[in-house]
Image (spheres, grey):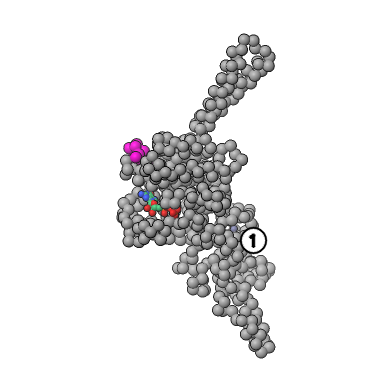
Amino acid sequence: MSRESIICPYCFETFRHDEVLFRAETCYTEDDILDDYDIDMMPDGEEKMRARETNELKKAFLAGVHPRYQEFWERYNGTTEQTRRSTSRSLGQGIENYQKPVINPRDPRMVRFNAPGGNGVELDKDGFLSSVIDIMGNHTSSRVCPRCCNPLPHNYGKFPVKFISVIGITGAGKTVYLSSLLDNMYDYADKIGMTPLPSESVNFFIELNKIARDVVLPQGTSPERMSQPLCYNLQYFHQGKGIRETSTFVIYDIAGENCVNPQGITNFGKFISHSDGIIILQDPKQFKDIYGEAHTMTQSVLNTIISLFVGKRYCDIPMALCISKCDRLISDGLLGSGLIDMLSSEVKSAEDFRGFCAKDYNNISKEIDAFYHDHDNPTRTALKNSFDNFNYFAVSSLNCRLEESSEISSIDGEKILMPAEKPHPMRIEEPLFWLFTQFGFIKSDIPIINHAVVGRVERLNHDKKLFMEELQRLESKRIIMPPTKKKINECKASIDEINRLIRELTSY
Ligand SMILES: Nc1nc2c(ncn2[C@@H]2O[C@H](COP(=O)(O)OP(=O)(O)OP(=O)(O)O)[C@@H](O)[C@H]2O)c(=O)[nH]1
Ligand SMILES: [Mg+2]
Ligand SMILES: [Zn+2]
């Protein structure tokens, strides 16, 4: 259990568990508050004093958006936080969760100090400040970040956190992917020996973006808006450390458009630069030789990612390049039968234990690499040259017949589609499993193919060629003086070193 500082999943500021603020359930509106003038006019006495006291207290619990919350969301065209009405215990109807008064648990005028000894608030069984009772007697466990006042999910901060960005152009399938992935997480996680803990915010996201037969697909989000981060706790047996652990995952849904324009990079870059893993969803229409639509966005996105992790020769953040909607490529006859067979089969656990099945995966990865070679070699080259830890995936979150519904999208005015049969997602869990192997959470049966190695070996071979040419030039001299002899030896040593590196890299 981590008692270290907590990183806010919104503003990335760090703070201690007992520095959090709370959203109070006690909540008044302007209508509940008396005009000071009316109190002044009351006859002097105890009643007047009590009225003034109560009125001041109510003012402290006045509904309204906290200025720091407001400031955070201004650059994203307003908040995307929604209030789940069925579970909201909000007193005032029509009051959003983010309008509830923010109270400071260290302020005895706002909260009851009911810890033994009456000096402070009570901590939970893990020693965390996770709930308080306000001075009006109402309990709250809605913690918010002390810097940006955004909500912290239940238990957030107790476990180590991994941040994952899912990036893709508008319409690439991010929302459908995340909703399908999270909705099926119990079954997927089980394959690798993990157990997801219930998460109200994730359930709410799935409810809002339900993927099912005869239910309209989610409407797109405009790119400048920021979707709520999705926080998820997973329990597992850490196959590297050999102990049971819980980790928190925070997943961000980021429109690729924000990785190419400067304003977008300013606003969204921090989510990417704080990421421990990245999933890029590439829409099949981005293969321009296939569908004739010129979308070179993927390379711009890659360049932006590289520039966000400056100071490194390679970008070593694990990156899953993932073709979305691969059912389209299949139905359009663009994938070979071998790859189709592999993609159509279920993601399996490793043969002897609940880990990553690289025996199956490596073949898929090789085939998709070949597909990129044929259809989007610039992206493939950019990856091999600049990323030290990437891999290829192809997924379909729907893989079912779609029909037009009668609903019209408020964004592009087109009819919204809906699945006409039960969706049959294809291998959507695989990129996540791969990230887990890279985080060291699970093991794979055999070493996982690493294409970046190929790029590095290519570069080493190129360097070796230059040294060999230099060696030839030096050795061809008629008279070899000691300084030349020294250079020859240096060249030979460099070639030996390169050979050693190549052997090391290709020994898997
Ligand atoms: N054939 C097929 N279509 C898909 C699949 N996933 C998504 N789509 C289609 O792509 C559309 C867009 O998917 P979204 O998940 O909303 O895309 P997004 O990346 O979230 O888009 P924005 O929110 O606009 O950035 C869906 O409405 C579907 O019509 C899939 O696996 N197969
Ligand atoms: Mg979306
Ligand atoms: Zn914050």
Residue depicted at 60% across the width and 39% down the height: 312
Crowding at dot 1, Cα within 10 Å, few <14 / some 14-19 / many 20+, comes out as some
Name the main secondary structure of what is drawn in magenta.
Answer: helix
Res 135 seen here: no
Q: Nearer the viewer, residue 233 or 44?
A: 44
Cβ of disc 1 within 8 Å of ligand 3? Answer: no
Amino acid marked by disc 1: Glu
Q: Nearer the viewer, residue 270 or 232?
A: 270
Q: Up-down: is 300 above or below 234?
A: above
Residue 61: x and y, percent?
60, 73
Task: Please name the residue that numbered disc 1 is placed on.
Answer: 19
Residue 135: x and y, percent?
62, 73
Residue depicted at 63% across the width and 21% down the height: 490
Residue depicted at 60% across the width and 42% down the height: 310
Residue 221 part of the magenta segment = no
Residue that sits furthest to the bottom in the current view: 43
Res 335 seen here: yes
Residue depicted at 62% across the width and 79% down the height: 55
Residue 84: x and y, percent?
47, 65
Q: Up-down: is 451 above or below 224?
A: above
Residue 413: x and y, percent?
38, 59
Residue 497, by quadrant, is: top right
Residue 340 part of the magenta segment = yes
What span is in magenta?
334-343
In the displayed structure image, the side of residue 399 where residue 499 appears, left or right: right
Q: Nearer the viewer, residue 155 or 27?
A: 27
In the displayed structure image, the side of residue 161 where residue 327 appears, left or right: left
Describe the element under mark 1 as helix, strand or loop.
Answer: helix
State the count of labels.
1
